[in-house]
Image (cartoon, grey):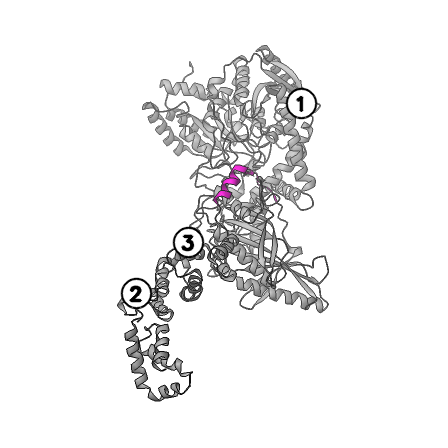
Amino acid sequence: MSAWEVVIGLEIHTQLATRSKIFSGAATAYGATPNTQACLVDLGYPGVLPVLNEEVVRMACKFGLAVGANISRRSVFARKNYFYPDLPKGYQISQYELPIVEGGEMVITDATGKAKRIAITRAHLEEDAGKSVHEGFAENSGIDLNRAGTPLLEIVSEPDLRSAKEAVAYLRKIHAIVRYLEISDGNMQEGSFRCDANVSVRPVGQSELGTRAELKNLNSFRFVEKAINFEIERQVNLIEDGGEVVQETRLYDSDKDETRSMRSKEEANDYRYFPDPDLLPVVIDDAYINAVRASLPELPAAKQARFVQQYDLKSEDAEILTVSRAMADYFEACSESTNAGAQVIANWMLGELSAALNRDSIDISASQIAPAALAGLLTRIADATISGKIAKDVFEAMWAGQGTADEIIESKGLRQITDSSAIDAIVDEVIANNPSQASEYRAGKDKLLGFFVGQVMKASKGQANPAQVNDAVRRKLR
Amino acid sequence: MSDGPESLHLQTLSELSAGLAAGDFSSRELVDLLLRRIDDNKSLNAFITITAEGALAAADTADQARAAGSGGPLCGLPIVHKDLFCTAGVRTTCASRMLDNFVAPYDATVVANLANAGAVYLGKTNMDEFAMGSSNETSYFGDVKNPWDASKSPGGSSGGSAAAVAARLIPAATGTDTGGSIRQPAALTGTTGLKPTYGRVSRYGMVAFASSLDQAGVITRSAEDAALMLGAMAGFDERDSTSVDHPVPDYVSLLDAPLKGLRIGIVKQHFDDGLDAQCAARVKEALVALEGRGASLVEVDLPNLDLSVPTYYVVAPAECSSNLSRFDGVRFGHRAEDPKDLLDLYCRSRAEGFGPEVKRRIMTGTYVLSAGYYDAYYLQAQKVRQLISQDFKQAFDKVDLIAGPTAPTPAFALGEKTDDPITMYLNDIYTIGANLAGLPGISIPCGFSDSLPVGLQLVGPHFAEDVVLRCAHQYQSITDWHRQCPENFR
């Protein structure tokens, strides 16, 4: 195995978050009744013509600028011709020789923890096809054209990725950036973010590429990793057994965790690309590009660096906090409302909050505990009103909608006991109830300190200030 | 007009407009008369669909509008549409079995614009299948006869529109011109046919043949009528990205400016061996007449003109092969009975739905776009197209218009060229250049060759429809060729 080098390139299809389609005014919302969101243009009716939705150009420019690519001053839509029932016109409008975005790169962290640059070849605009529905139509197939004409940005990488893990890391970075730019909702279940992987292997040290297989239908990060790993093993085994990899398209079956052949190179279509005469070239000037650049938000890498510097966070924590804009915004909103300390906020967000969100499958933007509310809780830890342990109970009560931290602390009487005479009284009582342990402690069995502290905390229902309890026990048993 | 109501069919749109305005007759009377004439002359086969009921209702609406003083010049005037303009609720066949029963749920922009101007459409005209042909013989609905001689072709592809206007069944008809499909049939039927600048008139709702060449226009009996129609048809349409946002002047008001100082280019290649001697003589006489009106004649060179036919027959089929892919039997149009699988559905629906000329062009177009042939054919043709455009551009540095013959011969016999596509294609040799360069052109009658009409073509720079129309109008003000009516249709 170690004698083989893996070479992977990804083609990522990102559905752009426009309200209407790329060449028509029909809506793009997901999940509508079949064929209710397809107008005459999407249906490919005789005589109708496509009109470009300018919003997609702006979105493609945002992406290009965010990855340091060149924005083409002139790009051209072309027709990709092939027959398929869910392709109403008999051709897909795409970009071929002159895409809107060329070049660019994305930096990932490789297996050794070092930064690695992955080159982006191009990103081009195109329309999606409809869907063939094979279930529920005896002997026939149904066609749903709601998706036909949905705008896509296809992002093509160079074959710079060397493992399934790197491929997933790159995919996650692209996923984060399109969501940061708010050009896609990135929803993989709904197919708004999907990828094909070109995978080949070659002996380490060989410069020419091996024959590649294109893997289709990879609609989750996990499947991308599993499919690529399966394919690497298949190719290596094949070659080591004296066989040869053939250039083909393979479909990943997540139920069986395997890839299988869809069609070979010989069966591939000749798409007969040519410039679409119904659409003018897309011409972009510097002023437009500058305006788009000015509208770009702070991007994940920059934000991560700033979090480390400004908040003195650990780099790993800063990376996770900046995976999505919502997460980062939550953190910053929280830190504005409390003096609890950035690392405490980070710990709580990556601990309790993330666990609760995952458990209930809720996005942070819809969290039932708002940033200011979490800040309110963390403030009460910082000012010693409650202990960290009690705070976890308060958090759960807040999550269950029982009120603010202060309301819950008050109504449940969770305020920490800091009155030293009250603490002394409990300590006295615990010592009196445990005379033999007291004698042992006094005889030098120091380990029993923890026992007494625990008993006091238990007697105070956790509300006694732990530091004060510690002091009182030591003092009383001296 | 001294003519009685029974001779209204001989009048031009402009004359009829004046008559309606004066209250000499109603739109309903006029439409009624023309519907009867259309019915009496079915043997021409100029129509695929006649919309009598809708036309009479629209005529009544127009009469009410005129009575209320709100109608414009086209209000209540009868027209017909070539059967590739989509008309809501009325079938649009493109003269193909593929669309025999296709009813569009919307109006083409041209149809809507003319309806908004008050024009009343009486039906939809026969044509070459999907506008592919120069003789109207590729129609699924049969040949159209030339009103001047029923054994002759009216030209194509807008043959039904041209024949209907020539036979005085209608004063004006829409058409489309991809390689000469308005101008050539106008020449062969003694009518006036205007192809505007590419982008002047919206293509929305016009079933596409070759998108970069197709342009909607009009066939009438005078340049003045063409000006009137163009004013209503033209203009930017946000639904057609290739339509141009360029002001639409009042073409009619610009017709009378003098020709003095107008420089007319004569292309020497136009008068080479391929041109019929009588046609050449008629065209030269017309040029002399224009000189007499103050225009000057200047020789210009279009060195790449001989490449226009081969260039066209790469570009147009390439685009058509893609444009016609949507006719697959899945959503609309002809579908084969009992397909055994998807491939069978595609193959038989298309084999049964398309005629031989359409198939020939789809195959040619598929070939020239194929991997390994694209550079040698499609890309090469695009380069030559640029050269031809450059030739015109340079010529228009020296002249205001280019004049010459529209077609190399007068009307040819039906069946004469059907077995020889190349000879048929060469019939468009003088017209194709304007499509490749996107230029406006007009064909007007300039005399006869053995009792068959001969056409004079005028081509102008982009958006110079006003100059083209003015020159044509002034020629028609000193000649009466455009008023000649075939004997059986007076």
Which residue is painted at 59% across and 56% down in the image? A10
Residue for badge 3: A32
Q: Nearer the viewer, residue A209 or B424?
A: A209
Q: Quadrant of residue B342?
A: bottom right
Q: Looking at the picture, do discs 1 and 2 lie on one chain? A: no
x%, y% of residue B362? 61, 42
Mark positioned earlier in the residue sequence (2 or 3): 3
Residue bearing mark 1: B270
Which portion, as a residue range, is magenta?
A272-295
Q: Secondary structure at mark 2?
A: loop
- Residue B134 lies in quadrant: top right
Task: Chain letter for mark 2, please.
Answer: A
Output the chain of dot 3.
A
2 vs 3, front mark: 2
> Please, what secondary structure does the residue beneath circle 3 have?
loop
Residue A120 screen position, x and y as percent = 60, 51
Residue A282 falls inside the magenta stretch? yes
Chain ID at mark 1: B
The amino acid sitting under disc 3 is Ala
Amino acid type shown at disc 1: His
Give the residue at mark 2. A402
Distance from the alpha carbon under mark 2 to that under mark 3: 37 Å
How packed mark 2 is, by other alpha carbons closer than 10 Å (few <14, some 14-19, many 20 or more), is some
